[in-house]
Amino acid sequence: MTRQTARSSTRGRPTAHPLCIGITAGDPNGIGPEVALKAALGPQPANRRLVLVGHRAVWLRAATLLGRRPPPEIHELAAPIPRLCTWDPGPAPAPRPRPGRVCADAARAAYAYILAATAAAQTGHLQAIVTAPISKEAFQLAGICEPGHTELLARLTGARRYAMMLFGDKIRVVLATRHLPLRKVADALTADAIVDAVELLACALPWMGFRRARIGVCGLNPHAGDGGALGTEEQTILAPALARCRRRGWNVAGPVPADVIFHQHLAGQFDAVVAMYHDQGLAPLKMLSFETGVNLTLGLPIVRTSPDHGTAFDLAGQGVAHSTSLRAALDWAARLATRRNPWA
């Protein structure tokens, strides 16, 4: 299957049954409600049903900001569902509108939206969920223990092994470690973590349409350690982990110096890359796909995507935020929901 085929859209190809996708509002003080509503108001395939998950007041403010009529409200996820509607799942109280502010009540509302959408996906009322951005700082302020969507969704669905996969039109990256201070990365990096990342990616690539699943793995240190002169993690951790991966039959190469591997990826040598830490993988991704990047959580029994950007508090409440990334996340959620989820 070609890359073009793997990225082909589902627009204009309705299936026999409606595809119901939930879009959470994210942090109500960020750009989430705005970009979610912008994306939802765009052209959609005839079989697609979109449920905007969040307090009705949040969606009313977003509609007013955009100068659009708000979608109708539903009170339960029961057929027939309109092509576009809002759903207030409760029970968290509606937060005070404070665009651009880090607030605990907004985080508690965003948390409630995630819980409701995830539960609806687990019961089959939603075939996929797209999550608008949350504030990790606000989550901490509200006393929510999970640092972000990935860990929270894993707990809610009982996923033991999971990973962040981020991708754009030309680049696909999975992170072996996630949101860690740089000084803690080397200690957190284990052979098991690398094997898990490769295995999850090896399952995800066919799901996305890449049958050969050719995977390149970054080194941790400059020049991939340069034979031990610049660090030994490549020899003591990565090499044994990749040997295990090859014995299991996965098409994996590495460790490859991080300043080389993304050039090789773009040249077609690899279908995706495993990066050792957050910025090693996300810096090249955002350079190439800042406005179109998508975050896909691997290892979940449900389909979850999100835009690859944050709350953008500096833009909140102005009506100027772009919805391109969320539209891409929505189209990918729909596409993957029609295929066999390897972790379902």
Image (spheres, helix red, strand yellow):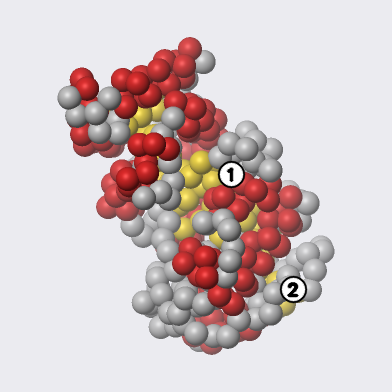
Q: In which quarter of the image is residue 230?
A: top left
Label pair 1/2, CB-CB below 8 angstroms = no
* Residue 158 location (% of width, % of height): 68, 43
Left or right placement of residue 55 versus residue 212 in this view: right
> Residue 336 bears which disc, if any?
1
Left or right placement of residue 204 versus residue 125 in this view: left
Q: What element carries label 1?
A: helix
Left or right placement of residue 261 versus residue 88 in this view: left
Q: Is residue 141 above or below residue 236?
A: below
Q: Quadrant of residue 131?
A: bottom right
Q: What element carries label 2?
A: loop
Lower position in the chain sequence, tag 1 or tag 2: 2
Q: Of 100 and 32, which appears nearest the observer?
A: 100
Residue holding disc 2:
91
**Residue type, numbered disc 2:** Pro
Residue drawn at point x = 59 percent, y = 63 percent: 144
